[in-house]
Structure formats: structure tokens, C-alpha cells
Image (cartoon, rainbow, N blue to C red):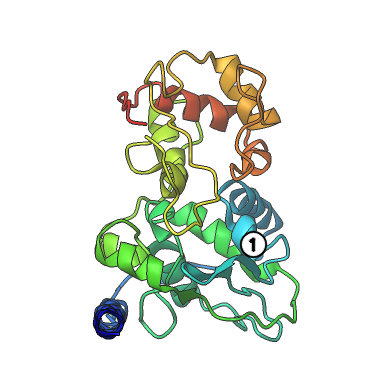
Amino acid sequence: MKLLRWLGKIAVGVAVLAALGLGFVYWRSNQLLAQRIQVDEPALTISTDPATIARGEHLAVTRGCTDCHGSDFGGKVLVESLPVGRITGPNLTRGMGGIGDPDPILLERAIRHGIGADGHLLIYMPATDYAGLSDADTGDLMAYIASRAAVDRVMAPPLAGPLIRVLFLLGKAPLAYGLHIDPHAAHIASIDAEPTIAYGRYLAQGCTGCHRLDFSGGHVPGTPPSFADAANITSDPVRGIGRWSKADFYNAIRHGKKPDGKDVAEFMPWRALGTMSDTELDALWAYLRTVPAVGKD
């Protein structure tokens, strides 16, 4: 009986410590997420020109916007798991539950800075993938968003669960990507679409959210353990794509097949990336060939 009482006291103590620890995690993470970030940039124009909207559609697909917000931009639930929380792409249309008439200033801040309409950080919005977008491309993307038909869809708000909050505090998951973006950084007006390393580097920004800044891959932050790891796409000849040919690269992006005939990971949005033009893929390939090898598992 005495032993049982001691075990009971230990269990109670462990539960109290766990509750205190969890309380601290939520308190500290809420403190960081409650930050307001000031961005002062001139408003971009939301065009109604058909060519601009068409270019924006291409960007929305190849940059992954439709993967998170749905093909109709009416919103989509990507992950709903207690430890992680709820990852959703909100409704960006004028319909019920959407953003109403798009405000060019607020829309640009959300895309390139990861900041919401109230000035607070957006969670899960991978704004680091879009922070370097040119004014021209951002304007085209906004034009396409503004052209979408109204969708009446009320989405449950994104939530950060205990696991993602712990990883966030440990610096292992970005959660609020806006914290990693310089709010005063200048943006280029435009960039020429050419099969060059420079244009490939520009396009590859959209790969960093999954493949990491060094393109070494690994588990995608914020996803459940069951999600496949992002591939190493550095020039490492063993763990990366150093031995791939240009044809191998095209086949993986356009058809979802690796050089050994196996399918690329289901999580990899190769169907969307496969709509890139030959010029874009040539540029991306040219750049990836210059990425230093990182041979970690």
C-alpha cells in the first residue's frame, strides 16, 4: 500500500509538471505569435487584364497556391491532427467565409510577409516561399486571386497544436514564417523568364518550404510523421540528384517518376510543377546543378 501511495504521488507530480510545461509552451508561443509587424510598402495594382490574370493562374498553380487554398481558392483543410493542430488554406474569394473584396495592401502583406489583415502573424502560411517574388509576379498572382468566382465556404481557423508549438519554440518548425522575413527588404520590379541560373534561383525559392533552405530535404515542418520526407535535391550524387540527367529531372517533374522507375513521393506536387514551361524547368535544373551537395540522411 505504501508503494502504491508513493507511485500515486509520483504520477500526480509528473502530471502537474507536464501541465505546467504545456502551459508554458502555450504562453510563450502565444507571446511570439501575438507580435504585430509593420510593413510600409506602396500598394501594387490589381489588374483586370486577361493576360495578367492568365499569368497569375500559372503562378498560382506552379507556386502551390491551389494546393493549399483549393483549385477554386475557396479554402481547404490539409491536416487535422491533435498533436500538430489544424492546417488550413483559408477562403480567398469574395464569398461567405472569404476575404471580401481583395485589398491590394493586405493581400501583398499576406503573400510576401505572412501578415494578416490585423497586422498579426499568419500561422502555417509559407510566406518565405513568396517573400522574394517580384512586384510583377505578385501583382499577377493578386490579379488571379481577385478574378476568382465567389465561393461560400466557411473554414475552421488554423490551429497550432502542442507538438508544433514545442517544435516552434525549439526552432525546429517555422509555424509563423513571417518571423523569418525582413519587413523592410526591397523587392525587384520584375525578372526575365530565361533558362538561366539566376532565374532558376528565383524559381527555387518556392521549393524551400519543403526542401529547406539548403535543399537537403527531410521531414516537412508541421506535417504528421506519416508524411513522406521531402527529397534531397542538392548535387549530392548519393542522397541527392547529382547523378540525375536533365531528362531524369524532367521525367520526375512532368511524370512523377524517378530514374529507377519508382514514383516520387505522393506529397510532392509534381503535377502542378509539371505545368511549368520548358524555360522555367531549364532554369530550375540549371540552378539545382549548382546547389552544393549536402549528404545528410
Q: Is residue 249 above or below residue 91?
A: above
Which quadrant, please, contains the C terminus? top left
Residue 265 quadrant: top right
Indicate the secondary structure of the residue bearing disc 1.
helix
Which residue is more in the foreground, 195 or 68? 68
Which residue is more in the foreground, 61 or 50? 61
Q: Which x, y percent locates residue 271? A: 68, 40
Which residue is more in the foreground, 196 or 247? 247
Counting other residues with Cα less than 10 Å from the Cα at mark 1, is it few (<14), some (14-19), or many (20 or more)?
A: many
Q: Which x, y percent locates residue 93? A: 66, 75
Q: Which x, y percent locates residue 208? A: 41, 45
Q: Which x, y percent locates residue 138? A: 49, 58
Q: Is residue 47 visible?
A: no
Which quadrant, please, contains the N terminus? bottom left
Q: Residue furthest front?
A: 1
Residue 5 quadrant: bottom left
Which residue is more in the foreground, 233 or 11? 11
Q: Residue at x 69, y 68 (%)?
A: 147
| Amino acid identity at mark 1 | Tyr
Q: Residue at x 43, y 46 (%)?
A: 219
Q: Is residue 146 visible?
A: yes
| Residue carrying label 1 | 144
| 281 to the left or right of 266 | left
| 153 to the left or right of 229 | right
| 210 to the left or right of 72 | left
Q: Residue at x 71, y 57 (%)?
A: 50
| 69 to the left or right of 288 | right
